[in-house]
Amino acid sequence: MIDRPLVEKAADSGVRKLSLLQHDPGRYLLRSILAGMYLSIVVFVFWALLHNLHASPFGKVIASAFFGVGLSVIVFTNAELFTSNNMYLAVSSAEGRTSWGSTVLLWIACYVGNLAGAGLVALLLYGAHALGDLPLDHALYSGAAHKVHQTASVIFYKGVLANWIVCLAVRLALRCKEDIAKIAIMILVVFIFLYLGFEHSIANMGTFSMSLLGNGQIRLEEALYNLAFSTLGNIVGGALFVGLPFSYINREENA
Protein backbone atom coordinates (compact mmCIF):
# COMPACT_ATOMS: atom_id res chain seq x y z
CA MET A 1 0.00 0.00 0.00
CA ILE A 2 1.63 3.21 -1.16
CA ASP A 3 0.23 5.28 1.73
CA ARG A 4 0.93 2.74 4.48
CA PRO A 5 4.09 4.57 5.62
CA LEU A 6 2.04 7.77 5.91
CA VAL A 7 -0.51 6.01 8.13
CA GLU A 8 2.31 4.83 10.37
CA LYS A 9 3.76 8.34 10.40
CA ALA A 10 0.39 9.78 11.48
CA ALA A 11 0.00 7.05 14.12
CA ASP A 12 3.50 7.79 15.44
CA SER A 13 2.50 11.45 15.77
CA GLY A 14 -0.59 10.48 17.75
CA VAL A 15 1.52 8.35 20.10
CA ARG A 16 4.06 11.15 20.62
CA LYS A 17 1.32 13.68 21.34
CA LEU A 18 -0.30 11.44 23.94
CA SER A 19 3.07 10.61 25.51
CA LEU A 20 3.87 14.31 25.85
CA LEU A 21 0.53 14.98 27.52
CA GLN A 22 1.01 12.10 29.95
CA HIS A 23 4.63 12.79 30.86
CA ASP A 24 4.87 16.57 30.53
CA PRO A 25 1.35 18.03 30.61
CA GLY A 26 2.63 21.57 31.15
CA ARG A 27 4.60 21.50 27.90
CA TYR A 28 1.66 19.97 26.05
CA LEU A 29 -0.68 22.64 27.39
CA LEU A 30 1.72 25.38 26.32
CA ARG A 31 1.83 23.95 22.80
CA SER A 32 -1.98 23.98 22.77
CA ILE A 33 -2.14 27.56 24.04
CA LEU A 34 0.31 28.65 21.34
CA ALA A 35 -1.79 27.01 18.63
CA GLY A 36 -4.84 28.93 19.82
CA MET A 37 -2.82 32.13 19.79
CA TYR A 38 -1.37 31.59 16.32
CA LEU A 39 -4.73 30.79 14.79
CA SER A 40 -6.52 33.66 16.55
CA ILE A 41 -4.15 36.36 15.32
CA VAL A 42 -4.62 35.03 11.79
CA VAL A 43 -8.39 35.05 12.37
CA PHE A 44 -8.17 38.75 13.25
CA VAL A 45 -6.24 39.45 10.04
CA PHE A 46 -8.81 37.46 8.07
CA TRP A 47 -11.70 39.59 9.33
CA ALA A 48 -9.67 42.79 8.82
CA LEU A 49 -8.92 41.83 5.21
CA LEU A 50 -12.53 40.86 4.61
CA HIS A 51 -13.71 44.22 5.92
CA ASN A 52 -11.08 46.41 4.26
CA LEU A 53 -11.43 44.67 0.89
CA HIS A 54 -15.23 44.38 0.94
CA ALA A 55 -15.55 46.56 -2.16
CA SER A 56 -13.20 44.37 -4.17
CA PRO A 57 -14.52 41.29 -6.03
CA PHE A 58 -11.35 39.55 -4.87
CA GLY A 59 -11.59 40.57 -1.22
CA LYS A 60 -12.96 37.27 0.05
CA VAL A 61 -10.51 35.35 -2.13
CA ILE A 62 -7.52 37.20 -0.65
CA ALA A 63 -8.77 36.90 2.93
CA SER A 64 -9.55 33.19 2.56
CA ALA A 65 -6.21 32.46 0.90
CA PHE A 66 -4.36 34.12 3.79
CA PHE A 67 -5.97 31.91 6.42
CA GLY A 68 -3.86 28.86 5.58
CA VAL A 69 -0.91 30.75 7.05
CA GLY A 70 -2.33 29.94 10.48
CA LEU A 71 -2.26 26.17 9.93
CA SER A 72 1.22 26.43 8.40
CA VAL A 73 2.56 28.25 11.47
CA ILE A 74 1.01 25.65 13.77
CA VAL A 75 2.48 22.73 11.82
CA PHE A 76 5.96 24.23 11.57
CA THR A 77 6.15 25.20 15.26
CA ASN A 78 4.89 21.83 16.58
CA ALA A 79 1.94 23.51 18.27
CA GLU A 80 -1.11 21.42 19.17
CA LEU A 81 -4.38 22.11 17.35
CA PHE A 82 -7.55 20.32 18.45
CA THR A 83 -8.97 19.90 14.95
CA SER A 84 -5.91 18.29 13.35
CA ASN A 85 -5.54 16.11 16.44
CA ASN A 86 -9.00 14.74 15.67
CA MET A 87 -7.34 13.06 12.70
CA TYR A 88 -4.00 12.09 14.25
CA LEU A 89 -5.45 10.43 17.34
CA ALA A 90 -8.18 8.71 15.32
CA VAL A 91 -5.46 7.12 13.20
CA SER A 92 -3.31 6.07 16.17
CA SER A 93 -6.37 4.63 17.96
CA ALA A 94 -7.61 2.82 14.83
CA GLU A 95 -4.11 1.34 14.54
CA GLY A 96 -4.25 0.16 18.15
CA ARG A 97 -1.38 2.42 19.19
CA THR A 98 -3.48 4.56 21.56
CA SER A 99 -6.77 3.97 23.36
CA TRP A 100 -9.95 5.84 22.53
CA GLY A 101 -10.30 6.88 26.17
CA SER A 102 -6.87 8.51 26.12
CA THR A 103 -7.73 10.08 22.77
CA VAL A 104 -10.76 11.82 24.23
CA LEU A 105 -8.72 13.09 27.18
CA LEU A 106 -6.10 14.52 24.83
CA TRP A 107 -8.78 16.19 22.71
CA ILE A 108 -10.21 17.83 25.85
CA ALA A 109 -6.79 19.03 27.04
CA CYS A 110 -5.93 20.40 23.60
CA TYR A 111 -9.31 22.11 23.29
CA VAL A 112 -8.89 23.84 26.66
CA GLY A 113 -5.41 25.02 25.70
CA ASN A 114 -6.60 26.32 22.33
CA LEU A 115 -9.42 28.21 24.07
CA ALA A 116 -6.96 29.79 26.51
CA GLY A 117 -4.75 30.88 23.63
CA ALA A 118 -7.66 32.40 21.73
CA GLY A 119 -8.76 34.30 24.82
CA LEU A 120 -5.25 35.56 25.47
CA VAL A 121 -4.90 37.01 21.96
CA ALA A 122 -8.32 38.64 22.29
CA LEU A 123 -7.20 40.23 25.58
CA LEU A 124 -4.01 41.50 23.97
CA LEU A 125 -5.95 43.01 21.07
CA TYR A 126 -8.38 44.56 23.55
CA GLY A 127 -5.51 46.09 25.50
CA ALA A 128 -4.07 47.46 22.28
CA HIS A 129 -7.46 49.09 21.46
CA ALA A 130 -7.51 47.08 18.25
CA LEU A 131 -11.04 45.84 19.02
CA GLY A 132 -12.68 48.89 20.55
CA ASP A 133 -11.68 51.07 17.61
CA LEU A 134 -13.49 48.85 15.11
CA PRO A 135 -16.79 50.16 13.71
CA LEU A 136 -20.00 48.42 14.72
CA ASP A 137 -20.49 47.14 11.18
CA HIS A 138 -17.02 45.59 11.00
CA ALA A 139 -16.83 42.17 9.33
CA LEU A 140 -15.60 40.64 12.60
CA TYR A 141 -18.78 41.60 14.43
CA SER A 142 -21.20 40.83 11.61
CA GLY A 143 -19.41 37.55 10.99
CA ALA A 144 -19.66 36.51 14.63
CA ALA A 145 -23.36 37.40 14.69
CA HIS A 146 -24.02 35.33 11.56
CA LYS A 147 -22.24 32.32 13.05
CA VAL A 148 -24.28 32.25 16.27
CA HIS A 149 -27.64 32.78 14.56
CA GLN A 150 -27.54 29.60 12.47
CA THR A 151 -29.48 26.47 13.39
CA ALA A 152 -27.73 23.73 15.32
CA SER A 153 -27.87 21.31 12.38
CA VAL A 154 -26.37 23.86 9.98
CA ILE A 155 -23.51 24.60 12.41
CA PHE A 156 -22.89 20.87 12.88
CA TYR A 157 -22.76 20.05 9.17
CA LYS A 158 -20.59 23.10 8.46
CA GLY A 159 -18.32 21.86 11.25
CA VAL A 160 -18.07 18.44 9.60
CA LEU A 161 -17.16 20.04 6.28
CA ALA A 162 -14.65 22.43 7.83
CA ASN A 163 -12.54 19.80 9.57
CA TRP A 164 -12.88 17.31 6.75
CA ILE A 165 -11.09 19.91 4.62
CA VAL A 166 -8.58 20.99 7.29
CA CYS A 167 -7.55 17.40 8.02
CA LEU A 168 -7.30 16.68 4.30
CA ALA A 169 -4.82 19.55 4.14
CA VAL A 170 -2.80 18.05 7.00
CA ARG A 171 -3.02 14.55 5.52
CA LEU A 172 -1.78 15.80 2.12
CA ALA A 173 1.05 17.72 3.80
CA LEU A 174 2.28 14.40 5.23
CA ARG A 175 3.12 13.30 1.69
CA CYS A 176 5.13 16.44 0.90
CA LYS A 177 8.89 16.26 1.34
CA GLU A 178 9.71 19.93 0.81
CA ASP A 179 8.59 22.63 3.25
CA ILE A 180 7.43 24.96 0.48
CA ALA A 181 5.21 22.20 -0.89
CA LYS A 182 3.68 21.65 2.57
CA ILE A 183 2.93 25.35 2.94
CA ALA A 184 1.42 25.57 -0.54
CA ILE A 185 -0.86 22.56 -0.12
CA MET A 186 -2.10 23.69 3.29
CA ILE A 187 -2.86 27.22 2.11
CA LEU A 188 -4.63 26.03 -1.04
CA VAL A 189 -6.77 23.37 0.65
CA VAL A 190 -7.65 25.41 3.75
CA PHE A 191 -8.82 28.16 1.37
CA ILE A 192 -11.79 25.92 0.49
CA PHE A 193 -13.40 25.89 3.92
CA LEU A 194 -12.84 29.61 4.52
CA TYR A 195 -14.21 30.69 1.18
CA LEU A 196 -17.30 28.52 1.61
CA GLY A 197 -17.92 29.78 5.15
CA PHE A 198 -17.74 26.53 7.10
CA GLU A 199 -17.40 26.32 10.90
CA HIS A 200 -14.01 25.70 12.53
CA SER A 201 -14.42 25.60 16.31
CA ILE A 202 -10.95 26.88 17.20
CA ALA A 203 -11.09 29.72 14.69
CA ASN A 204 -14.53 30.53 16.12
CA MET A 205 -13.04 30.74 19.61
CA GLY A 206 -10.92 33.64 18.41
CA THR A 207 -13.79 35.31 16.55
CA PHE A 208 -16.16 35.08 19.50
CA SER A 209 -13.58 36.17 22.09
CA MET A 210 -12.79 39.27 20.04
CA SER A 211 -16.45 40.05 19.44
CA LEU A 212 -17.32 39.66 23.13
CA LEU A 213 -14.48 41.93 24.24
CA GLY A 214 -15.09 44.44 21.47
CA ASN A 215 -18.25 46.05 20.10
CA GLY A 216 -19.92 42.86 18.93
CA GLN A 217 -23.59 42.15 19.56
CA ILE A 218 -23.35 38.46 20.45
CA ARG A 219 -23.84 36.99 23.93
CA LEU A 220 -21.63 34.43 25.66
CA GLU A 221 -24.36 31.78 25.61
CA GLU A 222 -24.74 32.26 21.85
CA ALA A 223 -21.01 31.74 21.35
CA LEU A 224 -21.10 28.57 23.46
CA TYR A 225 -24.08 27.33 21.44
CA ASN A 226 -22.08 27.62 18.22
CA LEU A 227 -18.97 26.07 19.75
CA ALA A 228 -20.90 23.06 21.02
CA PHE A 229 -22.20 22.06 17.59
CA SER A 230 -19.21 23.16 15.54
CA THR A 231 -16.92 21.15 17.84
CA LEU A 232 -19.01 18.00 17.43
CA GLY A 233 -19.00 18.52 13.68
CA ASN A 234 -15.23 19.04 13.66
CA ILE A 235 -14.69 15.75 15.50
CA VAL A 236 -16.81 13.88 12.97
CA GLY A 237 -15.12 15.59 10.03
CA GLY A 238 -11.59 14.98 11.27
CA ALA A 239 -11.92 11.52 12.83
CA LEU A 240 -14.72 9.83 10.89
CA PHE A 241 -14.20 11.42 7.47
CA VAL A 242 -10.38 11.50 7.36
CA GLY A 243 -8.61 9.67 10.19
CA LEU A 244 -10.50 6.36 10.21
CA PRO A 245 -10.75 6.01 6.40
CA PHE A 246 -7.07 6.94 6.10
CA SER A 247 -6.16 4.02 8.37
CA TYR A 248 -8.70 1.53 6.96
CA ILE A 249 -8.03 1.88 3.23
CA ASN A 250 -4.27 1.63 3.73
CA ARG A 251 -4.11 -1.44 5.94
CA GLU A 252 -1.66 -4.24 5.14
CA GLU A 253 -3.24 -7.03 3.09
CA ASN A 254 -2.52 -9.58 5.80
CA ALA A 255 -3.65 -7.33 8.66
Image: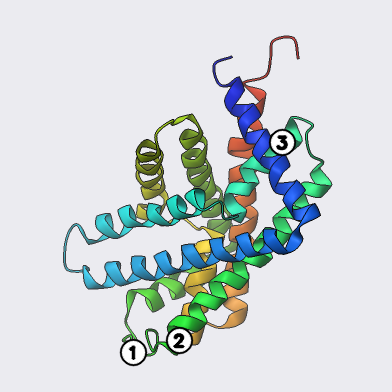
Instruction: Examine the rendered structure and indicate whether residue 54 appears above or below residue 154.
Output: below
Residue identifier under label 1: 133
Q: Tell me which numbered mark, 2 or 1, is placed earlier along the sequence.
A: 2
Residue identifier under label 2: 126
Instruction: Examine the rendered structure and indicate whether residue 73 appears above or below residue 227.
Output: above
Q: Name which quarter of the figure residue 189 lies in.
A: top left
The answer for how far apart the CA atoms under marks 3 and 2 are is 40 Å
Judging from the image, what secondary structure is the residue with disc 3 in? helix
Q: Position of residue 53 (x, y in %)?
A: 21, 68
Q: Residues within 10 Å of mark 2 (few under 14, many from 20)?
A: some
Q: Is residue 149 visible?
A: no
Q: Which mark is residue 92?
A: 3
* Residue for point 31% across, 86% down: 135
The answer for how far apart the CA atoms under marks 3 and 1 are is 46 Å
* Residue for point 75% across, 54% down: 21
In-image side of 204 versus 57 (left or right): right
Q: Amino acid at mark 2?
A: Tyr
